[in-house]
Amino acid sequence: ATEAESRDLVIIGGGVAGYVAAIKAGQEGMKVTCIEKRGTLGGTCLNVGCIPSKSLLNNSHLYHQILHDSKHRGIEVGDVKLNLEQLMKAKDQSVSGLTKGVEFLLKKNGVEYIKGAGSFQDEHTVKVQLNDGGETSVTGKNILIATGSEVTPFPGLQIDEKTVISSTGAIALEKVPKKMTVIGGGIIGLEMASVWSRLGSEVTVVEFLDQIGGPGMDTEIAKSIQKILKKQGIKFKTGTKVLGGEQSGEGVKVNVDSAKGGKEETFDADVVLVAIGRRPYTEGLGLENIGLELDERGRVIIDSEYRTKIPHIRCVGDATFGPMLAHKAEEEAVAAVEYIKKGYGHVNYGCIPSVMYTFPEVAWVGQSEQDLKKAGIKYRIGTFPFSANSRAKTNLDTEGMVKMLADPETDRLLGVHIIGPNAGEMIAEGTLALEYGASSEDIARTCHAHPTLAEAFKEAAMATYSKAIHY
Ligand code: FAD
Ligand code: NAD
């Protein structure tokens, strides 16, 4: 390619990180190319992650609620049947609508979209193996690595997406397994355990740590959601290490041991879900051709402006440091483009919300009690249970609570942790408050509409420095 053909920005990967950077750069008037090998845009999140899993969570919840939680509300239903094929079709429809929408947005913002696998030829040139056959190459003044992540395999178990599955298999099973064992009680494990348990599977979650929920969940909240999920029928084996497994045509045997050493046990299951985390994906990217290094966990090493040691090559999203979350990838994508275009950008890593879309949902932002204890920071706690909230009582959905942590001297908000039916929406208020450096009194003195679940948020804030009115 000649210099005249050179782009302002070449992006490798069209996931959330890549496509958001492409749109932003297009909006900034840059000449942009986005290379994606999947055949559709949106990456893990839209194709096999956030979106399909939430479709299944939403519809399996409806099914379960109609079956088990409707009679006492005065709704009598007749013959309720699961049509798994249609459930999967509804999911596929949401996915294709959104991925096509992203393709439209790239077009609208003048982004060139190349379907193929990109790899570095040199510091400015990316060679593309086109999906339709053949090869091309593009040059860029700036290059953004946005190649995302892949599932971490479990040693000794071969993922075939039929009997030993990853999250990708778990969103596409053709029948409801009689018994399912989930290795890893993090977010993927618990969301997928919820889906299949609601649809009729007998699910056991095996978690190495004493606490479920993955990294970052407040311990009190984790214990509380575990009790709720247990009541829904999910079995838990915490403090338990999976040693290995044996696959056969019949199913899988999983051998476990107490994490502290002890008696070995074996679980039989039709399907085993491996959900022990994800790892950065940089395979075939040709990083060796430009001398870029990865850290010990396979992450692309960057500075605070997302630059690798070759300053015009940057990296954002799951392929580098930080929580593997779509909204984190999106924030970084915008900031990276702003650094290129304007020389400044901003992501507040202390203020990235997390949501687990079980029922009820679990959501948090800021620091947990264990974080604060570890850092030696003093805090005050305010809690408010949904059992004392009028809207939750009206809805007959009273499980969960809002828990707020604030600085005892300045009253500044330090963290918010919620278990509740719409915790994932409510956490946006906590995130905004934290971002603006609010005190808990600022929140408590903000008028909240009645009757709403958000009143529990206000009352928990009140409880940090004074007393809640309704509890
Ligand atoms: P990805 O989405 O992985 O995108 C990277 C893209 O790059 C891929 O499409 C890949 O094909 C492409 N690519 C890689 N190498 C090349 C190459 N050499 N050439 C061309 N293309 C290449 N996060 C949330 O915030 N909320 C959720 O509810 C949520 N749910 C999830 C559920 C599941 C089951 C999973 C697995 C993940 C979930 N996540 C969720 C995490 C979220 O999907 C990721 O954090 C997000 O997708 C990261 O975006 P990314 O663009 O960095 O990477
Ligand atoms: P995770 O890191 O959240 O949880 C993995 C869990 O597996 C941990 O609790 C870990 O202790 C446990 N584990 C590891 N090895 C084990 C073993 N040998 N035996 C038993 N337990 C073991 O990872 P995940 O749930 O696979 O999710 C991957 C990524 O995807 C995460 O970064 C997550 O944030 C993201 N994700 C987010 C959402 C969401 O935001 N709602 C949904 C799904 C996935």
Image (cartoon, grey):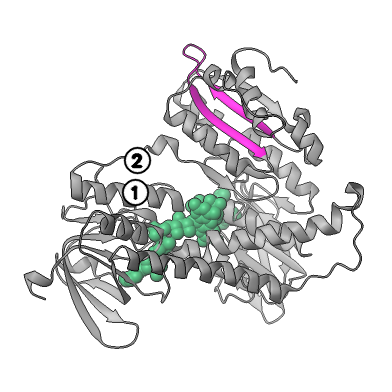
The residue identified by callout 1 is 332
Q: Amino acid at mark 2?
A: Val
Quadrant containing the C terminus in the rendered view: top right
The residue identified by callout 2 is 347
Residue at 65% across, 63% down = 56
**In the image, is residue 129 above or below residue 51?**
below
Q: Local crowd at mark 1 within 10 Å, few (<14), some, or many (≥20)? A: many
Q: For residue 412: magenta?
A: yes
Q: For residue 350: magenta?
A: no
Residue 176 quadrant: bottom right
Report helix, strand or loop for mark 1: helix
What percent of the width, then of the height, locates residue 69? Answer: 84, 51
Residue at 65% across, 67% down = 272
In the picture as drawn, the residue positioned furthest to the left comes out as: 3
Ligand 1 closer than 8 Å to the CB at disc 2? no
Residue 253 quadrant: bottom right
In the image, the segment drawn in magenta is 401-419
What percent of the width, then of the height, locates residue 178? Answer: 77, 70
Report helix, strand or loop for mark 2: loop
1 and 2 marks in contact (CB < 8 Å): yes
Whichever of labels 1 and 2 marks the residue nearer the N terminus, that label is 1
What percent of the width, then of the height, locates residue 356? Answer: 60, 48
Q: Amino acid at mark 1?
A: Glu
